[in-house]
Structures are given as C-alpha cells and as structure tokens.
Image: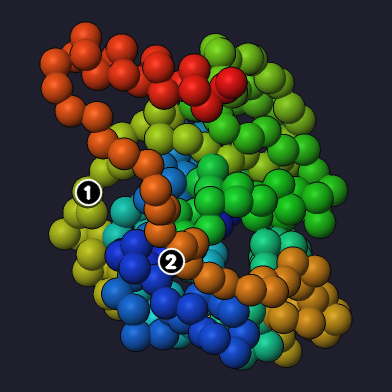
C-alpha cells in the first residue's frame, strides 16, 4: 500500500504575528512544530505500511525551515519526504494550498491512500484535506477515528460525529483526515533519527510542478484577509458578590429588569 501523508509545520506558540502588508502569518524565524493532528496521520500511515507493506511518503508545503518537520516524520518511520518550497507559493490560502499539494501528489504518481490531520492548529479551517481530494477527484472521509478494514481496492472506516459515529466504506484511492482518537503516536527510534539526519530531501518548486500561475500563492487565493484588529475590551457590567442564594436572587432581578 502506497501512502502519502500531508503535514504542515505550524508555530509552536499561539502568539503568531501577522504581516501588516499581506495580512498573512509570519513564519520565518518562528519556532515551529509539526501540526499536532498531523502526528496522528503520520503514525497511522506508518502502521498501515508496516501491516500491508508498500511505502509511506510525507510531503509538506512551506519555507525552507519546514525541512525539519519532514526529517522528524522520517525518524518516525516514513520512507521518503518531499519539500514543496517556492516564493511563488507564499500567501496561499487553503484552496491554493490544496491545489499546490495536489499537483505534487500527481507528480509523485501512484498512491492508494492520502492521510491528513483533521485540521491545522494555526488556521483551524479543516479545508486543505477536502480540497486536495476535490482537485484529485477522489473520495474523501473526514474525522476518521478508526480504520476498521482494508480490502483489495477499498477500506472501511469509523468516522467520528457530534453524537456518535458512522461506518463508511470507500473505494481506493481515497483521502482520509484523522482525529487524535485514531492512535497514539510513537517516539522516534535512534535508528530512525540517524536515517532521517542523513536523508536527502528533494525540494520541488513551481518549475518542477508546472502549476497554473493564476492558481497559486496570493494570486490564486480567493480568500483574502481584508482587515485584522483586536476587539475592544468590554465595558459596563457589574460584579455580584455575596452568598450564592443572594447572588442568584440579584441576578434574576437584573434579568427581569433588562427584559422589561
């Protein structure tokens, strides 16, 4: 089974900075980690490879520093890694990002399954995985908490929902986005870390992928951040102090006054 795992390097801190000119995240020089949900995608891809054979390839789109995320994925058991990096891709929204990643996947060629984390911690949109499947015209199943069975040309998964779960069977190739309930990520082995350190990671640019210039980067991003601002602090209101029964009584009277 040939598996492609899409990961993203995200800021380790929640105190992200915004470029005032482009209204995009400033990633250069910020300490980063692999998106936490992508760690579960890596683990599931490696488990499937170990069980069924084949190859697990990890890819990411980002600045040169994203290479460290790929090396970490290699240390966890992935076989190959590819960095998609070009200034032309800067400022991509989720649609342009999914288009670029799908172009890289087409260049990779044969695959049976694509795995992604359910969403990235810096954007929380959960749109890139479904976007990739749309560009590749393959089935997708989101919020997967368990892969129940893998058969020739199909697999059956358990998908998490707000009030329970559902069982879905999908033909392959397909794309899955996974949640943290699916597994427990492993720690890198010493052998894996040594192999990752020595690995050569190819860098694919716009030249290698030959994508439509109008569909990448800021130019190809229909989602535009028009304005960023900090909401003003709340004013007014009052604090109610005292015993619980007294506070509840005061609150009820205040609510009655507001309603009337």
Question: Which residue matches tag 2?
Answer: 9
- For this orientation, the residue located farthest to the top is 245
Disc 2 is placed on an element classified as: strand
Instruction: State how far apart marks 2 and 1 are (Cα).
Output: 18 Å
Disc 1 is placed on an element classified as: loop
Q: Which mark is residue 154?
A: none
Label 2 Cα neighbours within 10 Å, binned few <14 / some 14-19 / many ≥20: many
Question: Which residue matches tag 1?
Answer: 187
The image shows residue 247, relative to residue 153, as above or below, that is above
Q: Position of residue 34 (x, y in %)?
A: 38, 60
- Say whether disc 2 or disc 1 marks the residue closer to the N-terminus: 2
Q: Position of residue 76 (x, y in %)?
A: 32, 54
From the image, state whether disc 2 or disc 1 is nearer to you.
Answer: 2
Looking at the image, which residue is at 53% across and 70% down?
Answer: 229
Looking at the image, which residue is at 73% across and 89% down?
Answer: 207
- Report the side of 41 relative to 99 (left or right): left
Looking at the image, which residue is at 23% across and 64% down?
Answer: 193
Q: Quadrant of the N terminus?
A: top right
The image shows residue 211, relative to residue 147, as above or below, that is below
- Report the side of 68 relative to 26 (left or right): left
Is residue 229 in view? yes
- Report the side of 64 relative to 210 (left or right): left
Q: Position of residue 151 (x, y in %)?
A: 65, 23
Looking at the image, which residue is at 39% across and 48% down?
Answer: 236
Label 1 Cα neighbours within 10 Å, binned few <14 / some 14-19 / many ≥20: few
Q: Quadrant of the C terminus?
A: top right
- The image quadrant of residue 132 is bottom right
């Amino acid at each position: 089974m040939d598996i492609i795992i899409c990961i993203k390097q995200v800021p380790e801190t929640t105190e992200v900075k915004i470029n005032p000119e482009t209204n995009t995240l400033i990633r250069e020089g910020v300490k980063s980690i692999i998106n936490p949900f992508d760690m579960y995608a890596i683990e599931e891809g490696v488990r499937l490879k170990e069980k069924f054979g084949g190859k697990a390839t990890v890819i990411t789109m980002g600045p040169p520093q994203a290479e460290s995320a790929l090396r970490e994925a290699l240390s966890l058991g992935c076989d190959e890694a590819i960095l998609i990096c070009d200034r032309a891709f800067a400022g991509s929204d989720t649609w342009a990002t999914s288009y670029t990643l799908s172009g890289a996947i087409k260049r990779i060629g044969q695959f049976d399954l694509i795995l992604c984390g359910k969403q990235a911690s810096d954007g929380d949109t959960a749109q890139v995985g479904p976007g990739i499947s749309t560009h590749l015209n393959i089935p997708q199943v989101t919020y997967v908490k368990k892969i129940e069975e893998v058969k020739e040309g199909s697999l059956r998964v358990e998908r998490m929902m707000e009030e329970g779960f559902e069982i879905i069977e999908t033909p392959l190739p397909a794309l899955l986005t996974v949640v943290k309930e699916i597994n427990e990520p492993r720690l890198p082995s010493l052998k894996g870390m040594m192999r990752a350190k020595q690995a050569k990671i190819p860098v694919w640019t716009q030249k290698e992928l030959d994508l439509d210039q109008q569909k990448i980067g800021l130019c190809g991003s229909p989602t535009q951040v028009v304005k960023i601002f900090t909401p003003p602090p709340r004013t007014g209101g009052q604090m109610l102090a005292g015993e619980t029964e007294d506070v509840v009584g005061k609150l009820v009277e205040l609510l009655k006054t507001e309603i009337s």
